[in-house]
Image: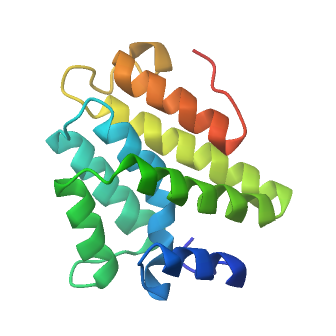
Amino acid sequence: MKNLQMPQNLIKKWEKLGFVRNNFRLVFLAPLLQTAWAEGFLQAGERRAIENFAVLEFGIEPDTSEYSELKFWLDERPADDLFEKMNQILNEWLDAMQVNTRNRWRNRLLQACLDVAHSSPRIGFAARKLSNVCPDEKREIMQISRRLGFMPTA
């Protein structure tokens, strides 16, 4: 969904967080980043999963300000307060979408969070169920799921 446009009222909230208008697609990466950072550190597989999602889903390429911001978040964990504010913006944006689009994004984001969690070398891709995710990441995915308006099955 490279052609997403953030609603005008949310662009103002985004800019109040200190971000530039053109980097708004990064808000969709907040749940993935939260999942990856749940244990207090980021693993190489989690980093690759997030970077791949950013490139494939949104076309965020190296040598852009969006990619630079993403790289910073992959190196330095964003503060809980920033995650909370980004998730509020994401929720408002999802709520403003048509039902089919909103549900598709919610499902896609949950799957991407699971992909990040399963990219851990301790878990791997063999069993792609929430019950096979480390406890910290599982807890984070459950909280993200509640914020996005649905609960996954364990």
Q: From this viewpoint, is residue 4 visible?
A: no
* Tally of numbered tags: 0
Image position of 101 (left or right of 18): right
Residue 1 drawn above or below residue 94: below
Asked if residue 42 shows in the view, the reply is yes
Q: Residue at x 66, y 44 (%)?
A: 148
Q: Position of residue 131 (x, y in %)?
A: 46, 13
Q: Position of residue 68 (x, y in %)?
A: 23, 75
Quadrant into which the C terminus falls: top right
Out of 86 and 116, give the one closest to the viewer: 86
**Residue 21 position within the rendered picture, expressed as x and y whole percent measured from the top left:** 49, 86
Q: Is residue 13 left or right of residue 121?
A: right
Residue at 69% across, 52% down:
104
Which of these two is toward me, 31 or 119? 31
Name which residue lies at 51% across and 59% down: 86
The colour scheme applied to this rendered structure is rainbow
